[in-house]
Amino acid sequence: MGTFAKLVIAVAVVIVAVNLHFYFKNVTHKLDIPKDGYFGPGAKHADNTAIKPFKVNVPDAVLQDLKRRLEQSRLGHEVLEDVDSFEYGFNSKYLLEVKEHWLKKYDWRKYEAILNSFPQYTTEIEGLNIHFLRVQPPKTYKKVYPLLIVHGWPGNVFEFYKIIPMLTDPNKNLPGAQQDFAFEVIAPSIPGYGWSDAARKTGLNQISVARIFKKLMERLGKPKFFTQGGDWGSAITTNLAKLFPENVIGVHLNVIFVMPHSNAKTFGLHLLGHLFPSFTFSSPTQHQFSMKTLFLETMRESGYFHIQATKPDTVGVALNDSPLGLAAYILEKFSTWTNLQFRHLPDGGITKKFTLDEVLTIVMIYWTNGNIAASQRFYKEFFMDPNIDHLGMQYLSAPTGYACFRNDVPNTIPEEIVAANANLTHFKEYPDGGHFAAFELPKLLAGDVFTFVGKVEKMYNGRI
Ligand SMILES: *[C@@H]1O[C@H](CO)[C@@H](O)[C@H](O)[C@H]1NC(C)=O
């Protein structure tokens, strides 16, 4: 028997064992999710429910300190002579170009002004000041649907600066659009990311944040809304829709997480799909489906995940102390997660899809808020609460749309597998595009959201 056949059998045995384990655990386990939480400093107190206007305003001293650190940055290695690429991690030769650009051409105040062109607010929920953008459409639209759009790691609300105007005013900003509805967009910063407070206590996870964002929407007087998300935003909005089905009209995702053992059908599709992909999956792009590739790619690309899910604070020290280190750590993901092939390019292909200014703005938001470690703790919290697994295995009954961008990492989920886990109302594959769809291909993603919501309107005969 070949080594790989043995591996498949070993993996299958493990999956069956895990499946049985979860099956019996699920029979006895009841989701036990607190209705409330408190993550602020000291003893619990009632939230101040005021909604306060907010503007980004980084002090000059912070920018001067950054300049000094960049000028004095110390790189201890050169790229290997025969690997001028991203295969060993961020190419240090290219990192020096990024540094030059950052020091000589990048203008934070320009991007701060773009951020401040969106109305922003903060409000206290569960002891934390939650920052959010709230953008209204013009009065010309007959119908306005609230849309909660949630970012992930290593991103922040800046990922949405191009898509928001398309969602709030498609007829003006989305080429070819003729819509009678538009979205009021609410884009919060996850606690510990951007300008939202970081938790001071353990337990702030993808369930707590779902609850916090649901409270935010209710506080804004929008108890029924659509959601959109990728990365952690996908996990948060999916949890929100499962826990509070009465609040969510529909869930649009550009990244989906499915546990291979979530149910018997999903488990079967993974095994069958591995052995006979073209028989199991309708889309030709999934005819390469292979648990082996999936496993190996996941191993290759998930080192960061293991670190952050175990000892986030340790690496957080270095990243918060060195702007160049922080940029390498974050921008490597904007390269590889946009397209795995970019690992072979000397510059990681970053500027094929983004401008250096754009991706440096993402880094600047982590740098100026000093919250990279807080953002990484979100991985650790993911594994600390068994409810997350149990909820992850539950069927998502809200109408669900999946914009499947082919280069997402480590893989996209075949339509058949998604349909075994969610009320799949809309599915579309895009031949290009990766993990940061809103940032990379905002027109396609915005168009997909409108198509999905149009379909949901039809399901409800226009009575949403
Ligand atoms: C899918 O969503 C529609 C609209 O809410 C609902 O009528 C239908 O029962 C759902 N289907 C499943 C399988 O949950």
Image (tube, helix red, strand yellow):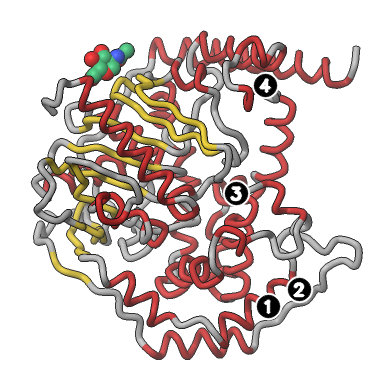
Tell me the residue that label 3 is attached to.
337
Question: Which kind of residue does numbered mark 1 sit on?
Answer: Glu
Q: CA distance from mark 4 to mark 3?
A: 21 Å
Tell me the residue that label 1 is attached to.
97
Q: CA distance from mark 2 to mark 3?
A: 20 Å
The residue closer to the viewer here, 236 or 385, is: 236
The percent position of residue 18, horizontal first and vertical second, equals 58, 17
* Ligand 1 contact, mark 4 (Cβ < 8 Å): no
Dot 1, crowdedness within 10 Å: few (<14), some or many (≥20)?
Answer: few
Q: Measured along the vertical axis of the image, is residue 316 above or below residue 298? A: below
Query: Does dot 3 land on a helix, a strand or a loop?
Result: loop
Q: Residue at x 49, y 38 (%)?
A: 383
Query: Does dot 4 land on a helix, a strand or a loop?
Result: loop
Question: Which kind of residue does numbered mark 2 sit on?
Answer: Lys
Numbered tag placed on residue 5 in the rendering: none
Name the N-terminal-most of marks 1 and 3: 1
Dot 4, crowdedness within 10 Å: few (<14), some or many (≥20)?
Answer: some
The residue closer to the viewer here, 10 or 263, is: 263
Query: Does dot 1 land on a helix, a strand or a loop?
Result: helix
> Which of labels 4 and 1 is toward the front?
4
Numbered tag placed on residue 287 in the rendering: 4
Tell me the residue that label 2 is attached to.
93
Question: Which kind of residue does numbered mark 4 sit on?
Answer: His
Q: CA distance from mark 4 to mark 1?
A: 40 Å
> Which of labels 2 and 4 is toward the front?
4
Q: Are marks 2 and 1 in contact (CB under 8 Å)?
A: yes
Q: CA distance from mark 1 to mark 3?
A: 21 Å
Q: CA distance from mark 2 to mark 4?
A: 38 Å
The residue closer to the viewer here, 90 or 285, is: 285
Image quadrant occupied by the N terminus: top right
The number of numbered discs placed on residues in the rendered structure image is: 4
Image quadrant occupied by the C terminus: top left
